Amino acid sequence: MIERKYTVVYEPEEDGGYIARVPALPGCTTEGDTLEEARAMVKDAVRGYIECLLERKLPVPEFSEYT
């Protein structure tokens, strides 16, 4: 299995909790009640996102550039 690293942006929500998004993977967004939970959730979200790309034979981004 190939390992890739992606930049993750964590944003606090006004009502509490955090949103986590991966700029290199459009639409790959999740949330958690705590920063630790958001970190765990985004790992799962990235895995699922990449699995979908592979199933559809679409290219998987090799790296993350945050802009």
Image (cartoon, rainbow, N blue to C red):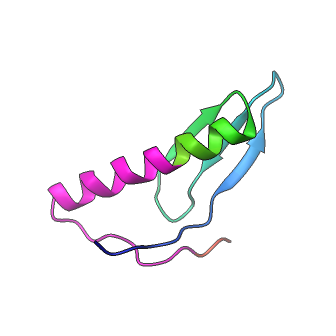
**Residue 52, x across and y down, in percent:** 25, 51
Quadrant of the image occupied by residue 30? top right
Residue at 76% over, 44% down:
11
Q: Read off the magenta span.
A: 43-64
**Residue 51, x across and y down, in percent:** 27, 54
Task: Tell me the quarter of the image containing the C terminus.
Answer: bottom right
In the figure, 33 relative to 61: above or below?
A: above
Residue toward you, 65 or 17: 17
In the figure, 1 relative to 45: above or below?
A: below
Left or right side of 24 for 3: left
Residue toward you, 37 or 28: 37
**Residue 42, x across and y down, in percent:** 54, 46
Residue at 61% over, 66% down:
7
For the image shown, how many numbered marks are present on the structure? 0
Residue at 21% over, 61% down:
54
In the figure, 14 relative to 24: above or below?
A: above
The answer to whether residue 58 is magenta is yes
The answer to whether residue 42 is magenta is no
